[in-house]
Image (cartoon, rainbow, N blue to C red):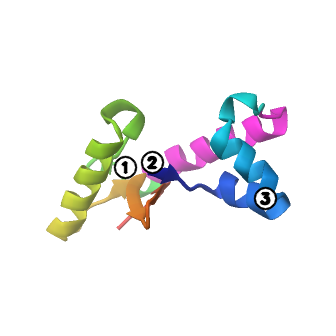
Amino acid sequence: MKKLSKSKLLAFRQCERRLWLEVKHPELCEDSSATKASYSLGNQVGELAQEIYDPKKEGTLINPQEEGFKSAFSRTSDLIKKRKRHRLFYVFISLAGWYNFLLLIF
């Protein structure tokens, strides 16, 4: 399974070879300070969304780095199938062999 992210899509738009390098040899890529700042801002937005939309902390945070990708995908799928009114943050989706995490609130 391959990880699809906004960063990968932007890399492709800039240069197809850049995307190839990021996928095949990520150890050769270095993030600029601007990129690191962008990641940090994205994390802050996610945390703020959780505070605003789930002040009672009743939602579910899917964290694939802690629980592993297979578990995150399985748990996301199970929670969505239950169709309860429930807040999910950073759900894990897969489509055609690619996967991504979305900040999702419902």
Q: CA distance from mark 2 to mark 1?
A: 5 Å
Mark 1 crowdedness (10 Å alpha carbons): few <14, some 14-19, many ≥20: few
**Disc 3 and disc 2: Cα gap in Å?**
38 Å
Residue plotted at (42% across, 67% down): 95
Position of 103 compared to 34: left or right?
Answer: left
Q: For the magenta stretch, what is the residue range?
A: 31-51
* Contact? badges 2 and 1 (CB < 8 Å): yes
Provide the secondary structure element on which disc 2 rests: helix
Query: Mark 3 or mark 2: which comes first in sequence?
Result: 3
Q: Is residue 102 left or right of residue 91?
A: right
Please state, as top left, top right, bottom left or bottom right, where the C terminus lies in the image: bottom left
Q: Is residue 40 left or right of residue 71?
A: right
Q: Amino acid at mark 1?
A: Pro
Is residue 76 within the magenta segment? no
Which residue corresponds to mark 3?
Answer: 16
Using the rendered view, name the quadrant where residue 37 is placed: top right
Q: Residue at the spot x=45%, y=48% of the render?
A: 51
Q: Mark 1 sits on what residue? A: 55
Between 60 and 53, the one nearer to me in the picture: 60
What amino acid type is highlighted by mark number 3?
Glu
Identify which residue is drawn at 67% across, 35% down. Answer: 26
Residue 50 seen in the current view: yes
- Residue 6: x percent and y percent? 64, 57
Q: CA distance from mark 1 to mark 3?
A: 42 Å
Q: Amino acid at mark 2?
A: Glu
Q: Residue 9: x percent and y percent?
A: 69, 60
Q: Earlier in the sequence, mark 1 or mark 3?
A: 3
- Residue 81: percent from left, percent from top: 19, 68
Residue neighbourhood size for the residue with mark 2, other residues' Cα within 10 Å, grouped as few (<14), some (14–19), many (≥20): few
Q: Residue 51, which numbered label?
A: 2
Q: Percent position (x, y) of residue 50?
A: 44, 50
